[in-house]
Amino acid sequence: RVDQLKYDVQHLQTALRNFQHRRYMREQQERQREELLARTFTTNDSDTTIPIDETLQFNESLQNAHRGMDDLIGSGTNILQGLRDQRVTLKGTHKKILDVANMLG
């Protein structure tokens, strides 16, 4: 009989705790709902900024890298053309030196 009473007391205490918890949660939800309903919303400030999307930043970085590679290729082309021009000049100079050497004997 005592064990049955202990079990009943535990069962009732658990039921009471559950009931109190549900009541507390319901009251908290009521308070939050009332706060939301009483809240006054305003428009955004005029200086609100929108952050740039990460993929847009990534795309911009890729375009910058692409432009950099194009610049490098253009510089390399200009350097090669300059070396070709120098070769032609040196060949002409070499030929003139050989002509002068042949004239002098």
Image (cartoon, helix red, strand yellow):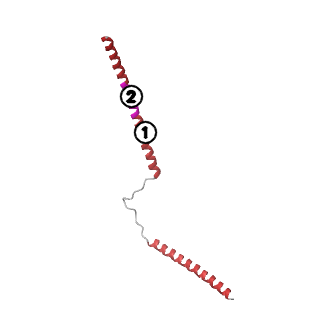
Question: For the residue labelled by badge 1, is the local secondary structure a helix, a strand or a loop?
Answer: helix
Q: Is residue 47 above or below residue 99?
A: below
Task: Say which of 68 and 3 sits in front.
Answer: 3
Q: Main secondary structure of the magenta part?
A: helix
Whether residue 79 is in magenta: the answer is yes
Q: Is residue 49 above or below residue 23?
A: above
Q: Residue at x 43, y 46 (%)?
A: 61
Residue 75 in the image: x percent, y percent? 39, 34
Q: Residue furthest front?
A: 105
Residue range of the region highlighted in magenta in the rendering: 75-86
Determine which quarter of the picture holds residue 19: bottom right
Left or right for 88, reference 3: left
Compare marks 1 and 2 and give the one earlier in the sequence: 1
In the rendered image, the quadrant that contains the C terminus is top left
Whether residue 3 is in magenta: the answer is no
| Amino acid identity at mark 2 | Gln
Q: Which residue is mark 1?
A: 69
Task: Say which of 101 and 37 sits in front.
Answer: 101
Q: Which residue is mark 2?
A: 81
In the rendered image, the quadrant that contains the N terminus is bottom right
Count residues near mark 2 (Cα–Cα under 10 Å), then give few for <14, some for 14-19, many for 20+.
Answer: few
